[in-house]
Image (cartoon, rainbow, N blue to C red):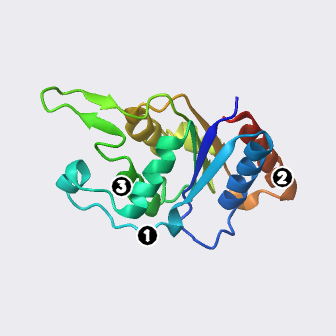
């Protein structure tokens, strides 16, 4: 069954010359060939302010550019989040974007009379794709994949998104043409499967 898929390209460089961009293009190509509908959010091209107060996060209005991204995410059945690992985590621009988008009222709803919250994005699945200079096993086992776990549990899962699959691509600078092609083929296959 065809899915609505949103690819969130989280690389902060707007030049679109990085392997993260090629991964997104391959995923999109595979998805479209299989009949899925795809929209892409390129975070580096979205003009938005950084959230600075708790009040703004919980009760402020989303800027128009963020509201458009929220509409795309609401439309989606499946999200693909792609970014490079910087200083052990996602780039700051992507984190600022997620703080704006996954705010109270859109992604979750707090009940003032209860410590519980309502997950408003239940029913959506996701894939997180991270490129990194270190071996993926070192990131996963030695560093505990802490930023990946935080994204999965504290942002996506907190809002009801699941299941969440992951693709960790290590030693990215050392990958030759054949190894890069293999990853592009994998992404195309994931896109065709809508997962």
C-alpha separation, residue under disc 3 versus residue under disc 2: 34 Å
Query: Outermost residue toward the bottom?
Result: 15
> Where is residue 178 drawn, in percent x and y?
87, 53
Tell me the element at label 1.
loop
Secondary element type, mark 3: helix
Task: State left or right for residue 67 relative to residue 82.
Answer: left
Residue 71 drawn at (x, y percent): 46, 49
In front of the other: label 1 or label 2?
1
Foreground: 109 or 53? 109
Of 105 and 114, the residue lying toward us: 105
Q: Is residue 48 visible?
A: yes
Residue drawn at x 73%, y 34% as measured from the top left:
193
Q: Which residue is mark 1?
A: 47
Task: State the separation of the CA atoms marked 3 and 1.
Answer: 11 Å
Q: Secondary structure at mark 2?
A: helix
Which badge, 3 or 1, is on the more N-terminal residue? 1
Crowd band around label 2 with a 10 angstrom C-alpha radius: few (<14), some (14–19), many (20+): some
Residue 110 in percent (x, y) is at 23, 35
Residue underneath mark 3: 100
Q: Quadrant of residue 155?
A: top left
Q: Nearer the viewer, residue 140 or 68?
A: 68
Give residue 189's position: percent from left, percent from top.
78, 39
Q: Earlier in the sequence, mark 3 or mark 2?
A: 3
Q: Few, some or many C-alpha atoms within 10 Å of disc 3 (few <14, some 14-19, many ≥20)? A: many
> Image point 20% across, 58% down: which residue?
53
Residue 187 visible? The answer is no
Q: Which residue is mark 2?
A: 181
């Amino acid at each position: 069954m065809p899915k609505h898929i949103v690819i969130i390209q989280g690389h902060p460089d707007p030049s679109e010359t990085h392997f993260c961009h090629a991964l997104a293009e391959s995923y999109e190509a595979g998805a479209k060939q299989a009949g899925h509908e795809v929209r892409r959010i390129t975070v580096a091209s979205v003009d938005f302010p950084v959230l600075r107060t708790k009040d703004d996060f919980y009760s402020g209005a989303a800027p128009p550019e963020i509201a458009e991204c929220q509409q795309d995410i609401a439309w989606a059945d499946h999200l693909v989040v792609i970014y490079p690992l910087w200083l052990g985590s996602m780039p700051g621009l992507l984190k600022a974007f997620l703080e704006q988008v996954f705010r109270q009222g859109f992604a979750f709803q707090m009940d003032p009379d209860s410590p519980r919250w309502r997950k408003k994005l239940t029913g959506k699945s996701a894939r997180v794709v991270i490129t990194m200079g270190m071996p993926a096993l070192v990131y996963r086992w030695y560093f505990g994949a802490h930023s990946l776990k935080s994204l999965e549990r504290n942002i996506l899962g907190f809002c009801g998104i699941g299941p969440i699959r992951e693709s960790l691509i290590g030693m990215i600078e050392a990958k030759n043409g054949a190894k890069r092609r293999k990853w592009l083929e994998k992404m195309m296959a994931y896109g065709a499967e809508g997962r």
